[in-house]
Image: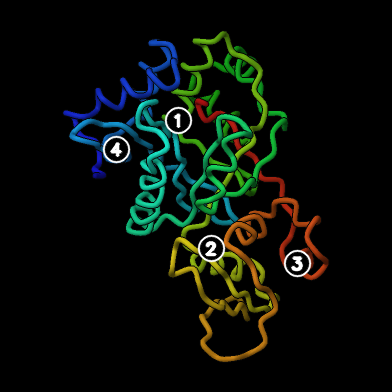
Amino acid sequence: MIHYADNTTRQQVYDMWKTVFGDSDEYMEIYFREKYRNENTLIYFESGKAVSSLQMLPFDFSFHGSEIPVAYFSGLCTLPEARKKGFMGALIKKSFGEMDEKGIPLAILVPQDKTVMKFYRQFGFTQTFDAGAPLPDLQKIMVESENLHNAYEIFDSFFRQRDMTVQKTPDDFRAIVEEAALFDFPVKKGLMAMSRITDAEKLLIIFAKKYPQIKVSVKVSDPIIGKNNAVFVIKNGSVSKSSKKETTHFYVEIDALTQLLLGYRTSEFSNDYRLVFPEKQPLIGFMME
């Protein structure tokens, strides 16, 4: 049975996180104070006990000149004795429905390591961010700034004009600095991360408005989210669904569409695709990972 967390179950989520990830009490105090919210946390209960949970943290994401809401999946964990029973899979699928109700078209997560990427792929996630890109020197920013507000402005200027990146608020930045100070301001690099489109039409509409010269039809296949299974016609800066038997230019699975719309290594796709979908440099970092 799946429910949102509340004040009576919050401690169970905390204890589960501690059991699975083993993070320090100091880090967890910051995370659960600054990022954790009951209303963003789904829990799977077995016999009345919380055995699996995930959090859908809200962020804005720069996407083809617009900013869209995204859900950053954090703290995905299952107690050791409850694994391999499908609980996390059920939570992930449930989260897609919750995102749809909230109008959130894209999910992002940072896998703990490459070995777990295969697990997330079965739910339509695919790699869209590479690791290693340089990020701002947080310690240098803090030393050279008069106050936290000025530091945030410098930090924000690095990300605000970039496409395909998670944007941070002043509150996010405050938590990032506090967490970094806890570990003596380690050097940070861009993270390897995965994404999953949950509302293809919504993202295609933004894409079409950005590139009104593009005229193409895309047939999308999504084994999990039914509404994404459609032929989308992009023309004159708008998108429509087609039921006619007309020429379809591209047939794509939802994971490929995610990479194409985020501009992830589109130069490695065939010529037909890369002429339509411009390559970008997706970047994600400072996620309190």
- Describe residue 283's horizontal placement relative to residue 221 as left or right: right
- Residue assigned mark 4: 43
Residues at marks 3 and 4, CA–CA distance in whole angstroms = 40 Å
Of labels 2 and 4, the one closer to you: 4
Sequence-first disc among 3 and 1: 1
Contact between marks 3 and 4 (CB within 8 A): the answer is no
Q: Nearer the viewer, residue 33 or 159?
A: 33
Q: Residue furthest right?
A: 271
Residue 271: image location, x then y, percent: 83, 67
- Residue assigned mark 3: 273
Q: Which mark is residue 203?
A: 2
Q: Nearer the viewer, residue 252 or 206?
A: 252
Of labels 2 and 3, the one closer to you: 3
Residues at marks 4 and 1, CA–CA distance in whole angstroms = 24 Å
Task: Give the residue type that dot 3 points to.
Answer: Tyr
Residue 268: image location, x then y, percent: 80, 55
Mark 1 lies on a secondary structure that is helix
- Describe residue 282's horizontal placement relative to residue 26 as left or right: right
Relative to 85, residue 17 above or below:
above
Task: Give the residue type that dot 2 points to.
Answer: Leu
- Describe residue 261's horizontal placement relative to residue 98 as left or right: right
Of labels 4 and 1, the one closer to you: 4
Of labels 3 and 1, the one closer to you: 3
Sequence-first disc among 2 and 1: 1
Residue 212: image location, x then y, percent: 65, 74
Mark 4 lies on a secondary structure that is strand
Q: Which mark is residue 172?
A: 1
- Describe residue 26's horizontal placement relative to residue 187 as left or right: left
Contact between marks 2 and 4 (CB within 8 A): the answer is no
Sequence-first disc among 3 and 4: 4
Of labels 2 and 1, the one closer to you: 2
